[in-house]
Each structure stands twice: as C-alpha cells, then as structure tokens.
Amino acid sequence: IAMHGDTIYYQGQRYIDTDIVTNSLRGDDEEYLFAEPRMQFSPACSGDLVAWVDEDTWGDIWYRRLPTGTNVRLTGAGEGWAGQSRPAVYGTKIVWQDGRSGNLDIRMHNAATGLTLTITDSPRIDERPAIWDDTIVWQRLEGAYWKIMSYDINTREETQVSPNEYYSYEKPAIWENRVVYVSYRGGENYDVFMSTLGTRTVETRITNNPSMQWMPKIYD
C-alpha cells in the first residue's frame, strides 16, 4: 500500500492478475489503473508520480505521470531480468533495488531531469530503499547483520544510521530526519526503533512487546 495526500494505491485482483488500484481514504472512488492481462504490483507514489513493478517486462520498474497518463519504463530495455523491485518515490525522485551488477544495489531516477544515478555499487547487498526529500535510506548486509544506511543526494555522503552493534536492523522508512526500522535484539521478537538524523544520530526504542513488530511506516 502507498499513500499520498488523500489517495491510496494498492494491489488488487479483479480477474486472474494483480493490478494497481487507486482509491480515496473514504473508499468510495476505486479505479484500476490497468486493464491488461498481466501483473503490476508494489506501488509507490508521490505527487503526480506512481511507480510500480511490471510483470510484462519480467519485473521492471515503470512509472506513470498522472496528469498525462504517460507510462515510462525505467529499467530492462535491452537487458535480461535483473531483479529490479521495491520502488519508492518522493517528488520527482524514484529509487529502487537493482540486481543488474550481480548483487542488489540502490539506484535513483529523477523524472524531472531524466538522470539515473547508481547510489550504491559494491559487493554487499543493499535493498529496501526509502526516500524523503534528498535523503535515501536502505538496509545493507554487513557480514551476518543488516545495517541501516543513508545517502545525501546533494553531498553524496553515505552514513550508517543504525548503531554499530551486533544486531540486525531492517525495513527502514523515513520522514524528514526521522528513520524507523525493526531490530532483533536477541530476544524472541522484532521491535520498532527510531533514529533521528543529525550531527549525532540518536536512537529511540518505540516498542517493547512480546509480539512481533514489523514493517514500520512514519508520516509527519
């Protein structure tokens, strides 16, 4: 599920395939964005852009400019399948995880300029990107543990967000300078934590519950 303003986007199955559906928060304005007999899934949106993964090209990133209805293919032209998935959008910037180099990296496309950038390019696995304004966050596999990383688009500076401890930190989401994620601290479940970006990253524990806490989101 993705949301911008009072509009939500989600996966829906009308017939045998999965399509992207838009609706109001009241639930009274449902509309399927596609009618083709193929799967579109994993929607992300911001402003006038909706991005998704499209089965028609073996799992590539596409986006639509809502005012014009124009669909744009970002990945896969002339290439084999390379595991492009999990798009996230802020303004005109679209980020996703991309496996064309042999392992998962983070890439970004600016729909306003047409420029595509490789944010990470290393033998490590970088996945699950999220973006707010000019900051991208994602999780990176360092040895046996996942760490939360950030990247400033303006300064091109990469920073580790999560504490340098022997725990895994996963599934980041960002709003302004606040990053939420889950971490397994050696107990029986994952809990939600939040780090505030700045001159010194400060971590706050959000949940401490015997039940599993998973897939956090943050907004305003």
Image (cartoon, rainbow, N blue to C red):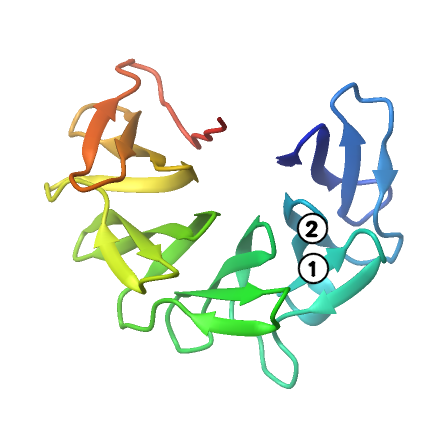
What is the three-letter code of the residue carrying label 2? Answer: Val
Q: Indicate which disc residue 50 carries.
A: 2
- Tell me, yes or no, whether the two marked residues, 2 and 1, touch with CB atoms within 8 Å: yes
Judging depth in this view, the residue of 151 and 172 nearest the camera is: 151
Rendered view: 102 above or below 131:
below
70 displayed left or right of 131: right
Q: Would residue 68 be seen by someone viewing this image from the given angle?
A: yes
Rendered view: 177 above or below 57:
above
Rendered view: 86 above or below 217:
below
As measured in the structure, the alpha-carbon distance from the residue carrying label 2 to the one carrying label 1 is 5 Å
The image quadrant of residue 52 is: bottom right
Give how far across and how far down residue 134 sits, in percent. Answer: 43, 53
Q: Would residue 1 be seen by someone viewing this image from the given angle?
A: no
Q: Indicate which disc residue 63 carries.
A: 1
Which residue is at a point 55% across and 54% down the rendered structure image? Answer: 87
Which residue is at a point 39% across and 76% down the rendered structure image? Answer: 102
Which residue is at a point 67% across and 45% down the rendered structure image? Answer: 47
Which residue is at a point 69% across and 59% down the rendered structure image? Answer: 63
Judging depth in this view, the residue of 40 and 114 nearest the camera is: 114
Mark 2 lies on a secondary structure that is strand
The image quadrant of residue 113 is: bottom right
What is the three-letter code of the residue carrying label 1? Answer: Tyr
